[in-house]
Image (cartoon, rainbow, N blue to C red):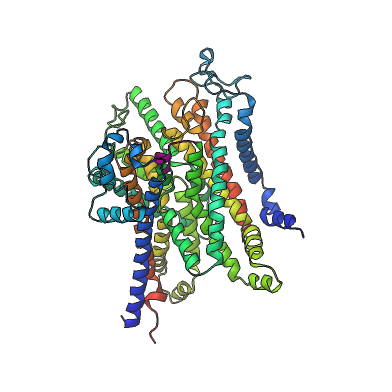
Amino acid sequence: MTTRHATQLGQAALRICGRWLTTVVGVAALLLLLVEMAPGDAIDLLPDGETLRAELERRWHLGRPLPERLLLWLLSALGGDLGTSWTIRPGAPVSEVLRGPALASLLRLLAALMTSAGVALALAWRSAGHASWLRRPVHVLSLAPVFLLAHLAVAGLNASAWSLMEAGWIDRPAWFALPTEPSVLRSFLAVVLLALGSTALSGLVTDLEDAIARLRHAPFVLAARGRGEPVDPMILRNLVPVAAALLADRLAFFVGGLVILEKVLLLGGAGSLLWRASLERDVALVLAIGVGTGLVVATGRLASDALRAYADPRLTTAPTR
Amino acid sequence: MSIGRMLLSSWSPSRHRLREPGTVLSAIVLLTVVVAGLVAPLLGYEPGLDVDPSRISEGPSVSALMGTDHLGRSVGWRLAHACRAFTLPGLLAAITALVLGVPAGAVAGWRTGLLASTVRVLLDIVSAVPRLVLVLLVCTIFGPGFVTLALAAGLAYAPTLADSIRVRVRDLRLAGHVDAWTTHGLSTPRILWLHLVALGCGRLVIRRLLELFAFVLVLETTLSYIGGFGVPEPTPSWGNMLAFDWGHDGHLVPLVAPAVALWATLAATARVASVFAECET
């Protein structure tokens, strides 16, 4: 690697990390600003806020200006202190309340992203550049909101299981009508429905079809084909940064969809915790989950940008002078 | 050519797409839903006062074309009245997104340097928060309600609208037309707001507003289905109709009708939006 090349990569890395940092700090500032805009102050949102006012004002630095509070919140967050829960588990550290559910949600999100990318790639590879009967059904299915898909899936499964039980063909399944017990089936449903619904799949397929069609006619692919080399691995390799960018663009939609699915399918996770915290006005927890979702989206963008910068030949094979 | 005619021709989709049966059907579905949302409350239907124990779970009849639900309420009336739950928030969200998104996108696309970079960073920040999370946070702080929901949806969608306009204005600025207009003596505000934004981005804005309408529809039905922040019973919403009617014995229409209506409206909106998308370039 030449010095010039290393400098270019370093500049790209700095730019990408700067964008990530700006986004994360900006999201925290935006959400703190929204909390600040609440009528009265944050303590007014608590059911027994007035009795604890003096203590909470000191702990939440309410008398200080917003930029100072943002800085203090960020510094505390860097040290792992996201404040304490107001109503869900009063007095418990938010980081402790959030740790387990956040991990479960993150795993579901990654599984849904991989599923969506895999299915979209398979469909797009088959239909890119020519008419396909699959396009319309995928589009129609993908239009449905995730809550509707979840509703139909649960209703269909329960009705089918009930019919089979009545006919004496099966015993009562473990997941049947036991909504509060953890279930692998419901987690599986959440991943599949998240990967398919709310136009996630349809949009990905369309964009990947365009990218594959473009790559198949790219000069370097045509030249490789002329030399008799296999071109599919070459196309797939060049498709990775494109697919990563498309997924990163849709990451916020996936996170939103997961929040809905965890609530509808009664799964434990950061999404269902966010619903509960919103209903019970646990602003500290909502704020932490909000910033956490922003962090996930910003990190997804960072990974996509880094992959593109690494794979882009204009950057990695720039000529030295 | 007058400005009105210029706007009309630059905003309307191509005529051959408008004549396609699918597009006509989609436009009819969309118009019906919007008109129902605006007009249904004027027709004297009172949610909560329509419970009729003598007509529980009746099939379709002349007096109730889609039958009645488990409380004897007309499914057709409730379906029509439920359009109000997302039509008015959709309109308010569109105004919010236009007010926030169009100036931000136009300035970021027209200017270069610090101002444009700052607007882009701000758009980046707002778009990094998932829309649903932003809406939930706003509802947590300001309390649930029709206006809160609409403003939050408009705020959450503004970055998408602004970014589309930014890219379009930047492309038009770099295409060379601006130099020609400047040479003809047109002022900068006229070039930017009339030629680039109003004439150059008209179809793009219409498409994005249709997508925003679909977003508000999905958001409202989701929140009403789950409960807590959406439309509470007995006021009808397609979301709470799906949730509330489930698990009661009777015919299938009360369960199927809201799902079909939701799916059909989303499909119609996507179809009409795609007609405008094809005419953008």
Of B227 and A189, nearer the camera is B227
Is-magenta flag for residue A254? no
Of B11 and A289, nearer the camera is A289
In the picture, measured across the screen, residue B196 lies left or right of residue B253, that is: right
- Expressed as whole percent of the image width and height from the top left, the position of residue A306 reads 35, 66
Residue B50 found in image quarter? top right
Determine whether B7 is above or below B266 in the image: below
- Expressed as whole percent of the image width and height from the top left, the position of residue B133 reads 40, 45
Determine whether B199 is above or below A164 in the image: below
Q: Residue at x 64, y 26 (%)?
A: B43
Q: Is residue A2 visible?
A: no
- Expressed as whole percent of the image width and height from the top left, the position of residue B166 reads 54, 61
In the picture, measured across the screen, residue A169 lies left or right of residue B113, that is: left
- Expressed as whole percent of the image width and height from the top left, the position of residue A255 reads 38, 48
Tell me which secondary structure the magenta stretch mostly adopts: helix
In the picture, measured across the screen, residue A43 lies left or right of residue A95, that is: right
Tell me the magenta residue range: B138-145
Of A231 and A257, nearer the camera is A257
Residue A178 found in image quarter? top left
Q: Residue at x 54, y 67 (%)?
A: B111
Q: Please, which residue is most extreme toward the right here?
A: B1
In the picture, measured across the screen, residue A53 lies left or right of residue A213, that is: left
Q: Is residue B176 visible?
A: yes
Is-magenta flag for residue B140? yes
Q: Which quadrant is home to the N terminus of chain A?
A: bottom left
Q: Residue at x 46, y 45 (%)?
A: A198
Q: Which quadrant is home to the C terminus of chain A?
A: bottom left
